[in-house]
Image (cartoon, rainbow, N blue to C red):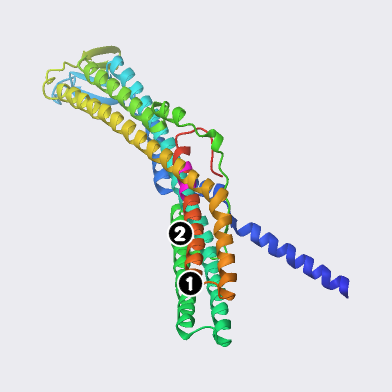
Amino acid sequence: MIKYVISILLVATFINHSVAQTNLLTIKDAVEVALNRNPDLNQARAVLLQMQQERKIVTGINAPEISFMKEGINNQADNPFGERRYSVSQSIDFPLASIHRFKRLDQEAKAQELKIKAMEKDVTVEVKSHYVAVVYALHLQKLRNQQIQLAKDLYNAVYTKFETGYGNGIDLIKAELQIAEAENDLDESEKILHQARYNLFNALGYNPEEQKYTILFTDTLRGAEDKISQYYVLNNLEKQPMFQSAELEYESIKYRIKEAKSNLLPGLRFDLYKQDYGNGFKYNGYEIGISIPLWYSFSQKGKIRVAKAYGEETLWKQQKIKLDMKKEVEDAWHGYITSKSTIERFQETIQNKAEKLQTLTLQAYRLGEIDLLNLINAQQIYLGSQQRYITALRDYYLKMIALEKYLDDEIVF
């Protein structure tokens, strides 16, 4: 019987462990889901597919035209017509214009591919940032529970003194208020956690029925600090996908200008036909024609000017992208350094001393060596240092994620 019970417990433990593993959403899983389901990203991929297919339909070779012609019709004559003719006509753009058009479309497609890479980086940053917010909220909730326990310890110490006649009602009311405030802070932390979860789920594209409370999150993250180099990032801004995409857009505009200029060259037209002058389709003929760009000032000249204006716009776009990236890198780097210093200072000095201060003041209050105000102050110092620590951890990972966008390697996982 005992072996049977143990077997059931082991199976139940295994099942619970399996369920927990199944419902666990890691930061890596979250990024993969978002990259597959993000609407803007999938829309950009569809645009790329359109661009790739467009190359097949702008060859400059128009659809052939088949026609039948009959002229000199006279039903009273021996020959009721002067000529009948079947013809096939084919018109094409001047080949140089088609070549420049192909090159333009190729550059535009490559620019779109780089835009998608840049968007994937942005989506990764967004999802990881939301995940960090969830982890922060989980730690904040733990801290608020610890705050309630400290408030209860304080209340118990005050109540003991009150029962023995060494305390007073005012201190007891203050202790009760500390518990109530701690409970309010816990409620607030739960609201922050729910909001962080919903923000993450929205970034993942989860439908309402998929946003389950059974989904679990890891409460620790790892960062590869050795891969962060401010010098490397700042000196490789022009290698970023968004900047390179703008460069290719500018190259495509150059081909657009050449294409418009090539349209000044004549288009070609070829006609082949079979002729019948009354005794059967015994004759063949052909015709070659060219288009003359008489309306240059109304059409192609305007297209050239428009393309040049697009080129000017793209150059300024490149400049703005570079300035925005530099600002983002500088802000992320300095924020990363500041939060890292705060974390190290807490771990090396503040943590142990704050814990020791809180423990000693509680003992001193029970012995009657200090008053309630000093005990409350010591607890606030301890809780405040813990709050600053987890906030610094949150900022530390957020800044690393912002810098990761400009690196080839993953540094937060």
User: Where, quadrant-wise, is the C terminus in this rendering?
Assistant: top right
Please identify the dominant SS of the magenta region.
Answer: helix
Residue at position x 31%, y 24% in the image: 252
2 and 1 marks in contact (CB < 8 Å): no
Magenta stretch containing residue 397, yes or no? yes
Query: For the residue labelled by badge 1, is the local secondary structure a helix, a strand or a loop?
Result: helix
User: Where, quadrant-wise, is the N terminus in this rendering?
Assistant: bottom right
Q: Which residue is mark 2?
A: 196
Image-based side of 246 in relation to 231, left or right:
left
Residue at position x 65%, y 57% in the image: 21
Q: Position of residue 70 (x, y in %)?
A: 20, 23
Residue at position x 35%, y 25% in the image: 248
Mark 2 belongs to which amino acid? Answer: Ala
Q: Can residue 319 be seen in this snapshot? A: yes
Q: Say which of 76 and 57 sits in front.
A: 57
Residue farthest front in this picture: 369
- Tell me: residue 39, above or below residue 214: above
- Residue 357 falls in image quadrant: bottom right
Pointer 2 or 1: first along the chain: 1
Q: Say which of 188 and 261 sits in front.
A: 188
- Tell me: residue 407, above or below residue 378: above
Q: Quote the CA–CA distance across marks 2 and 1.
A: 21 Å
Residue at position x 41%, y 31% in the image: 241
Q: Position of residue 204 (x, y in %)?
A: 47, 53
Query: For the residue labelled by badge 2, is the local secondary structure a helix, a strand or a loop?
Result: helix
Of labels 2 and 1, the one closer to you: 1
Q: Which residue is mark 1?
A: 182
Q: Residues within 10 Å of mark 1 (few under 14, many from 20)?
A: many
What span is in magenta?
395-400
Q: Position of residue 163 (x, y in %)?
A: 57, 87
Q: Count all numbered tags in the image, as a single digit.
A: 2
